Amino acid sequence: MARSSILWALALALTLAFAVLASTVGPGDFSIAELLEVYRGGGSPQARGILWELRTPRVALALAVGAALGAAGALTQGLFRNPLASPGVLALPTGSALAVVLGFALGLDAEALWVTPLLAFVGASGFLLLLFGVAGRRRDSSFLLLAGVALGALGGAAISCTLAFNLDKWDLSRRAMAWLLGSFDGRGWSHLSWSGPPILLGLMLAVALHRGLDLLFLGEDTAASLGVRQSRFRWLTAGTIALLVGAATAAVGALVFVGLIVPHVARWLVGPLHLRLIPASALLGGWLVLAIDTVGRALSPTFLAPGALTGLLGGTFFLVLLARHRGEAL
């Protein structure tokens, strides 16, 4: 217990150190000394404005979004007992993006600030329900992956059709592309204020589901004999996944494959028990997304879309996993 506490304290300290380092990167670079001076209440008005109003909420949002996607990936793989399952592979970010793009096209986002995150949650939930409906009682990996690919293709086609019917609306195309590529540009305290609470709630629910996921890994019959109500448990887990993915996608757009990469690394570090795996996946997910956003800011004025980079990393990682499992029943 003492060793575990020390490790988690070290991990949190590293997170704080990474956040401080990330806050020094970008246009108008600051040294760590200048950053600490601002945090102590000093520094120039320009430095305080940049660091408190731009950098700090952006870093916090990157950590929160990465944590949500990492935890959602651990839940997805545990629920389907499939090492290749992830919210991205199962098309959940595509479902969120489709709902949001349709909301843009209909002008629903102008109604209220909460409309966009609600649409993202509804889109992720809807695609997950479709996946359950298509799969029925089947949970073999090949069928689930094919169903996810099919839903992703349908969602992508629907997004393309929506944009094709609105080619004269330049602003709609610009916002839609920003969603599809993902972006932390222009994100501030307001985005963190409405995406943070559902992400925090989703993370708490994810940790609370750890025992059922461990038992489900032993087999459905064993889980049922030990008190897991499988139908109710699947719905609750699916809702938690949709909440995490929906809130994260609503904040910054679609960042695919984070939920595939992170749980594998976390499982290698802390083992398969979900009480440790889910928090570790959340922590590593925050680090990964923060690193990607920091690299993008370091390359300024060159724009490096976070979603494009996570897609490159995740696609390569996915191919490596397939190669490793070649000839095996996944």
Image: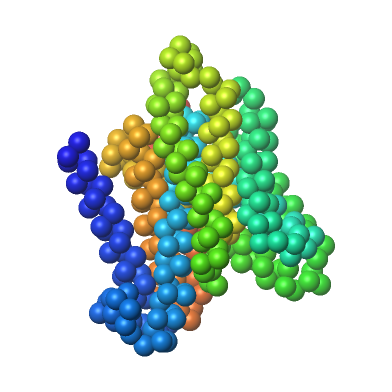
* Residue 261 in picture, x, y percent from top left: 41, 48
Q: Please, which residue is most extreme toward the left here? A: 2
* Residue 225 in picture, x, y percent from top left: 46, 11
**Residue 216 left/right relative to 165:** left
Residue 318 visible in this rendered orientation of the protein: no
Residue sitting at x 49%, y 70%: 304
Q: Nearer the viewer, residue 270 or 83?
A: 270
Residue sitting at x 22%, y 43%: 5
Q: Please, which residue is most extreme toward the top here? A: 225
Snapshot quadrant of residue 295? bottom left
Q: Nearer the viewer, residue 276 or 200?
A: 200
- Rendered-image quadrant of the N terminus: top left
**Residue 9 left/right relative to 241:** left
Colouring method of the image: rainbow
Please determine whether, in this image, residue 128 is positioned above or below residue 49.
above
Count of numbered tags: 0
Residue sitting at x 28%, y 39%: 270
Q: Nearer the viewer, residue 271 or 160?
A: 271
* Residue 176 in picture, x, y percent from top left: 67, 64
**Residue 301 left/right relative to 298:** right
Q: Please, which residue is most extreme toward the front here? A: 41
Residue 3 visible in this rendered orientation of the protein: yes
Snapshot quadrant of residue 194? bottom right
Residue sitting at x 47%, y 61%: 61
Q: Nearer the viewer, residue 298 or 246?
A: 246
Please determine whether, in this image, residue 46 is positioned above or below residue 221.
below
